[in-house]
């Protein structure tokens, strides 16, 4: 069913009685060419591009809960491509370009809203670092503008510019950055993949792998054994647990990241604003809620809820940067489990086990990567060769030392 202004109008005339389910609920088959474990944004995007770009349609996405119940449905929806290192910037810019054409491509309103991302700087040294980052972005075909304090004040007059400890010295502005509706992204990819023949199997947990002579031949699930030519794992915060089933120990730790939303207010925050002196960022949803977040909780966990000291820390940072938010009432907060890699950058690679492929280590930046991650993972699964834009995301880089340490923070997830 193609969605269009005309189909909306026509369904309206018919009392909205004829809409079809956006995807099927098939029974799992005994065998697929490719199985993707994890029905988050990345797994579904990989299935979508496998079917739409590579013509591989005998594919199943196996999800233990409902699609989008993990981080894809819990994140603060920021999209941007303001990275510095050569291993990262072209990849995230590819993602940005895919976001720009996504809704037309998969015929679904993902509410991609390029309202801009502003990173604030608070020292001269930080401003120099942003100038360098902006140049790296321009060289990779992205957009970047360095703003002075007057430019920032024009855009966000409500910030605390003269904070005695962290005065605002300017900012790096990416106009093409912004937000997208997280669950609509999941639904759009699911619908697009399903319409090309991909089976989306919900409420089916992968509990292990079928191994024959060291080769992965399928998965054990709560609904029985399913065989496959290739198995791709894309389970974000559950990466360590799932890959342990194949005898692998990953350079990844799982940590909780919390998000917060206030009561609905009139439009005030123009885009996404990030604090340069603490870990805090804020945007405003289309319904008017202030959406904000900060640091990961500082301990390993698989629980999808966070602890109170981080709530206090995030609110303190928010008050330091945007004092007016002290007047807003906090409505909700929640947590997701982050797959924090040891250099803050992701992995899209074949594993040492033949037939088994891995996509993970997205830390708290994987939503913006969803289109490129799916695209590059599909390329790897279809061709057995890394996509040219994702060649740096190898699993063995922690052994060889070719890490992509965007923040220079070393193997400390809480600093990435
Ligand atoms: C609070 C918060 C804020 C964030 N903000 C941003 C942001 O603003 N911008 C940004 O770019 N990124 C952000 N992120 C990060 C981003 O959400 C993730 O990096 C990204 O969603 C991870 O990829 P995914 O969508 O495939 O993961 P998920 O949606 O977590 O998908 C993994 C799926 O695998 C399933 N699964 C796990 N184990 C099994 C199993 N054994 N069998 C079957 N299925 C299994 C899970 O149920 C889950 O649905 C944020 C994350 C959180 C939690």
Image (spheres, rainbow, N blue to C red):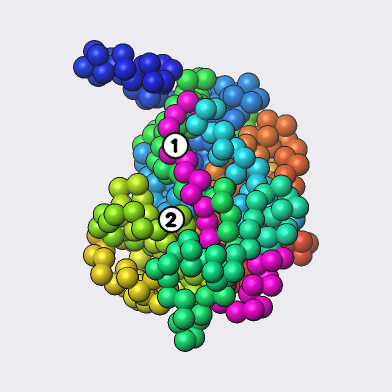
Rate crowding at label 2 as few (under 14), some (14 to 19) or many (20 or more) other CA atoms within 10 Å. some
The Cα atoms of the two marked residues, 2 and 1, are separated by 19 Å
Please tell me which residue lies in front, 341 or 313: 313
Q: Which residue is drawn at 52% across and 20% down?
A: 196
Q: Which residue is drawn at 52% across and 27% down?
A: 104
Q: Which residue is drawn at 38% across and 24% down?
A: 22
Q: Is residue 222 visible?
A: no
Mark 2 or mark 1, which is nearer to you?
Answer: 2
- 112 on left or right of 262: right
Q: Residue at x 26, y 65 (%)?
A: 328
Please tell me which residue lies in front, 304 or 141: 141
Most extreme residue toward the bottom is 164
Is residue 403 rendered magenta in the image? no
Where is mark 2, residue-wise?
270
Judge: label 1 CB < 8 Å from ligand 1: no
Q: Is residue 89 visible?
A: yes
The image shows a total of numbered marks equal to: 2
Rate crowding at label 1 as few (under 14), some (14 to 19) or many (20 or more) other CA atoms within 10 Å. many
In the figure, 165 relative to 297: above or below?
below
Where is mark 1, residue-wise?
110
Is residue 117 rendered magenta in the image? yes
Please tell me which residue lies in front, 113 or 83: 113
| Residue 344, quarter of the rendered image | bottom right
Q: Which stretch is magenta?
A: 106-132
**Mark 2 residue element:** loop
Which quarter of the figure is the N terminus placed in? top left
Mark 2 vs mark 1: which is more N-terminal?
1
């Amino acid at each position: 069913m193609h969605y269009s202004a005309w189909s909306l109008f026509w369904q309206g005339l018919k009392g909205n009685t004829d809409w079809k389910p956006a995807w099927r609920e098939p029974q799992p088959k005994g065998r697929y060419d490719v199985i993707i474990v994890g029905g988050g944004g990345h797994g579904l995007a990989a299935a979508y591009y496998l079917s739409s770009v590579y013509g591989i349609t005998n594919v199943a996405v196996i999800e233990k809960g409902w699609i989008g119940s993990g981080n894809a449905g819990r994140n603060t929806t920021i999209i941007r491509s303001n990275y510095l290192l050569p291993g990262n910037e072209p990849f995230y810019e590819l993602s940005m370009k895919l976001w720009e054409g996504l809704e037309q491509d998969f015929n679904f309103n993902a509410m991609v809203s390029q309202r801009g991302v502003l990173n604030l700087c608070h020292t001269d040294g930080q401003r120099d670092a942003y100038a360098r980052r902006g140049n790296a972005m321009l060289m990779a075909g992205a957009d970047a503008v360095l703003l002075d304090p007057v430019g920032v004040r024009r855009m966000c007059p409500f910030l605390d510019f003269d904070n005695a400890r962290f005065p605002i010295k300017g900012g790096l502005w990416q106009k093409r950055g912004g937000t997208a509706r997280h669950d609509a992204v999941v639904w759009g990819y699911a619908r697009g993949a399903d319409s090309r023949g991909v089976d989306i199997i919900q409420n089916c947990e992968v509990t292990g792998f079928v191994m024959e002579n060291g080769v992965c031949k399928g998965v054990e699930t709560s609904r029985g054994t399913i065989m496959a030519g290739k198995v791709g794992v894309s389970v974000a915060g559950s990466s360590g647990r799932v890959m342990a089933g194949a005898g692998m120990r990953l350079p990844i730790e799982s940590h909780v990241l919390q998000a917060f939303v206030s009561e609905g207010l009139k439009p005030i925050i123009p885009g996404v604003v990030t604090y340069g002196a603490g870990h805090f960022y804020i945007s405003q949803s289309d319904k008017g809620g202030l959406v904000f977040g900060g640091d990961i909780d500082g301990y390993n966990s698989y629980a999808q809820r966070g602890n109170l000291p981080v709530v206090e820390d995030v609110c303190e940072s928010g008050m330091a940067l945007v004092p007016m938010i002290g007047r807003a009432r906090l409505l909700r907060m929640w947590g997701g489990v982050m797959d924090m890699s040891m250099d803050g950058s992701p992995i899209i690679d074949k594993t040492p086990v033949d037939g088994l492929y891995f996509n993970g280590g997205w830390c708290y930046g994987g939503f913006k990567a969803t289109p490129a991650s799916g695209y590059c993972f599909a390329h790897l699964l279809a061709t057995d060769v890394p996509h040219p834009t994702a060649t740096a995301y190898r699993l063995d880089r922690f052994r060889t030392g070719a890490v992509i340490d965007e923040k220079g923070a070393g193997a400390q997830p809480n600093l990435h």
